[in-house]
Image: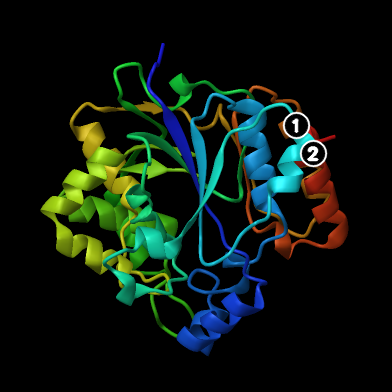
Amino acid sequence: MINYPIDAVITWVDGEDPKHKAKRMEYGNDNMFKAEDIAGDTRFTSIGEIFYCVASLNRYAPWLNKIYIVTDEQNPMLDDFIVKHFPDKHIPIEIVDHKTIFKGYEEHLPTFNSISIESMTWRIPGLCEHYIEFNDDLILAAPVTPEDFFTPDGKVICYGKKSNSFLVKLSRMIKYRKDGSKKVTFKETMLNAASLLGKHRYFIKLYHTPKGLLKSFYEKFFAGHPEQLTENIKHRFRHYSQYNPQEVQVLQLYREGLCELRDVNKNLIYLKPKNNFEYTKKKLARFSAAPECKFGCFNSIDQTEEQERNLIIEWIEKRIGLK
């Protein structure tokens, strides 16, 4: 059994906040705002996903030491919600501002770039050595244990698989936007990480699951490669040259025998809405028939029609015990 503390880190933004919108307008441009992979509205829109994420942690991982919510001069105002649904006991929550994790690098703020932010979350004061990183569109969909993320001797567990780098490199030749600029894809950022490490033949394909991470890995890696940290956080909006910091850790630890890969297909519920009510209804029915799936990702719910969105939210609330 694991007997060391484990924290959770959630990155969150309320893109409907007028102050945040104004900052995006000041630092971005029309081409960025038109590109969903860089600065499209859906990257920042919040319809309450943070409430479901936090509720799922309290429901299915009450053993967590603490929940840190990383944000930009905002507060999701969770207190009343937590008291209502978890009146007897809940995991302590702390709001962490970007200024805290970017201390010493304030010239790169404000940032609207999830890759940049995830490159700095390890700098949260008081963060445990072992922590689990979430985006706010992730939930726990079933009870989990510490052993779902780490081994008793401290190794990281990754829900991913080895993937051939050559095939992704081929896609680089064809994935351009209409304006001729390069797209910023999840796979591209993983391949960039593999190239950074000098590992070109394969990378570890990550999925939209919570990620178990080691704080000490980043401390050591960036102490030895300070220029790589600066290069990755200098872009206020996502950029094709950036690397996925989680991939850097997972791939290097895997090479050192310190990361265990597990099958994602048995553990992940993933839904990216298509504005097709019947499609979503059928997919949610399949999810309901898989109560053993531990993780859920509901991507861009804000882009759905009201009927479909209500169906998704009702399903989530039922799955995490809010109804």
6 or 154: which is nearer to us?
6
Residue 245 location (% of width, % of height): 32, 52
Q: Amino acid at mark 2?
A: Lys
Quadrant of the frame with the N terminus: top left
Q: Which residue is mark 2?
A: 84
x 58%, y 83%: residue? 22
Quadrant of the frame with the C terminus: top right
x 53%, y 67%: residue? 73
Kindly state the secondary structure of the residue where label 2 is placed: helix
Residue 27 location (% of width, % of height): 46, 85
Residue 109 lies in what quarter of the image?
Answer: bottom left
Q: Amino acid at mark 1?
A: Pro
Q: Is residue 242 above or below residue 316?
A: below
- Horizontal side of 71 relative to 251 (left or right) equals right
Kindly state the secondary structure of the residue where label 1 is placed: loop
Note whether residue 56 is visible.
Answer: yes
User: Residue lying farthest top?
Assistant: 1
Density class for disc 2 (Cα within 10 Å; few <14, some 14-19, many ≥20) is: few
For the residues bearing labels 1 and 2, Cβ distance under 8 angstroms: yes
- Horizontal side of 119 relative to 78 (left or right) equals left
Residue 195 location (% of width, % of height): 20, 55
Residue 158 location (% of width, % of height): 39, 33
Note whether residue 209 is visible.
Answer: no
285 or 96: which is nearer to us?
96
x 55%, y 71%: residue? 36
Q: Which residue is mark 1?
A: 87
- Identify the coloring: rainbow
55 or 282: which is nearer to us?
55
Q: Is residue 1 above or below residue 179?
A: above
